């Protein structure tokens, strides 16, 4: 299965669902991390550093990575942005999309989610100059980004037991964001705490929360944690 995880900035995917990404990759799924921007400028980073960090984080999780050229801090929902994402969806042949939860404190996250949701529609269109054949990813799920301060009310949780340490390693690969920047040094710790809490809700060591607007079909209860 081809799984595309979109994030407005490099590190959003790792922060929101790094354990799930690692788990899916370990199960043999092809996982592509799509960064809508390069995430710069930041207080302690630059484009070259962020590119190295994001590549290392993807390697740790077992995923691929593509970075688009939308402008950080001013991501705007537009037909052109939708076309860029739809082109990736078609070229990658995405079966599943993950995007940030649509309510968020960061404007880039809100705009980025809407871009990907609409690009999902654009990717199925015929008689267009988009690359590749039409495709409509069957599933679209939302992960919870760290700028959002609400307590998530998820539709489902993914058991990330055995992958929490890899998530932490991937997050800390962004040294300019979570090691050099003193204000963010506790982020990895509270991600660990959140993972432990959500795991406790389903009786596992760790878990990550997700939201689904559309119904999820089951063929049985055998896979429920």
Image (tube, grey):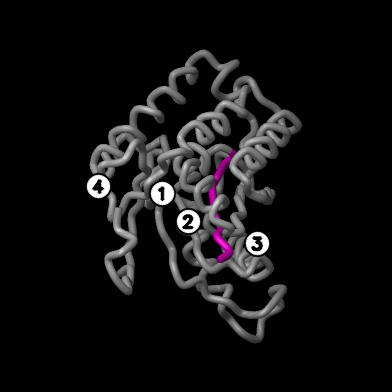
Give the quadrant of the N terminus. Answer: bottom right
Q: Say which mark, if any, is on residue 143.
A: 1
Q: Earlier in the sequence, mark 2 or mark 4?
A: 2
- Disc 2 is placed on an element classified as strand
Nearest to N terminus: mark 2 or mark 3: 3
User: Disc 4 to disc 3, how far (Cα)?
Assistant: 31 Å
Q: Earlier in the sequence, mark 1 or mark 4?
A: 1
Q: CA distance from mark 2 to mark 4?
A: 17 Å
Position of 102 relative to 204 (above/below):
below
Are the residues tagged 4 and 3 within 8 Å (C-beta)?
no
Quick check: 16 above or below 140?
A: above
> Residue tagged by mark 3?
84
Residue linked to disc 4: 153
Element at badge 4?
loop
The single residue placed furthest to the top in the displayed view is 182
Query: In the figure, is residue 147 to the left or right of 123?
Result: left
Crowding around mark 2 (Cα neighbors within 10 Å: few <14, some 14 to 19, many 20+) is: many
Q: Sequence-wise, which precedes: disc 1 or disc 2?
A: 2
Give the residues in magenta.
1-10
Do the numbered discs 1 and 2 sit on residues whose CB atoms are within 8 Å? yes
The residue beneath circle 2 is: 98
User: For residue 151, which quarter of the picture?
Assistant: top left
Furthest residue in direction bottom, as rendered: 127
Q: Position of residue 178 (x, y in %)?
A: 54, 22
170 vs 159, nearest the viewer: 159
Whether pointer 1 and pointer 3 mark residues with C-beta atoms closer than 8 Å, the reply is no
Which numbered disc flags the more N-terminal residue, 4 or 3?
A: 3
In terms of secondary structure, what is the magenta stretch mainly? strand
Q: Give me the C-alpha separation between circle 2 and circle 3.
A: 17 Å
């Amino acid at each position: 299965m081809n799984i595309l995880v979109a994030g407005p900035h490099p590190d959003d995917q790792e922060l929101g669902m790094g354990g799930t990404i690692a788990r899916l990759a370990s199960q043999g799924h092809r996982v592509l991390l799509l960064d809508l921007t390069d995430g710069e400028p930041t207080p302690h980073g630059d484009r070259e550093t962020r590119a190295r960090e994001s590549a290392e984080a993807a390697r740790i999780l077992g995923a691929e990575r593509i970075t688009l050229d939308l402008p950080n801090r001013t991501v705007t929902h537009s037909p052109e942005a939708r076309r860029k994402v739809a082109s990736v969806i078609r070229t990658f042949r995405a079966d599943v999309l993950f995007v940030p939860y649509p309510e968020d404190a960061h404007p880039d996250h809100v705009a980025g989610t809407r871009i990907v949701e609409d690009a999902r529609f654009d990717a199925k269109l015929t008689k267009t100059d988009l690359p590749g054949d039409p495709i409509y990813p069957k599933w679209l799920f939302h992960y919870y980004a760290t700028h959002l301060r609400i307590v998530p009310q998820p539709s489902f949780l993914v058991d990330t037991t055995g992958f929490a340490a890899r998530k932490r390693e991937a997050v800390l690969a962004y040294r300019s964001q979570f090691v050099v920047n003193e204000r963010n040094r506790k982020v990895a710790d509270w991600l660990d705490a959140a993972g432990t809490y959500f795991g406790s809700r389903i009786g596992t060591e760790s878990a990550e929360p997700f939201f689904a607007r559309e119904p999820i079909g089951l063929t049985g209860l055998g896979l429920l944690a």
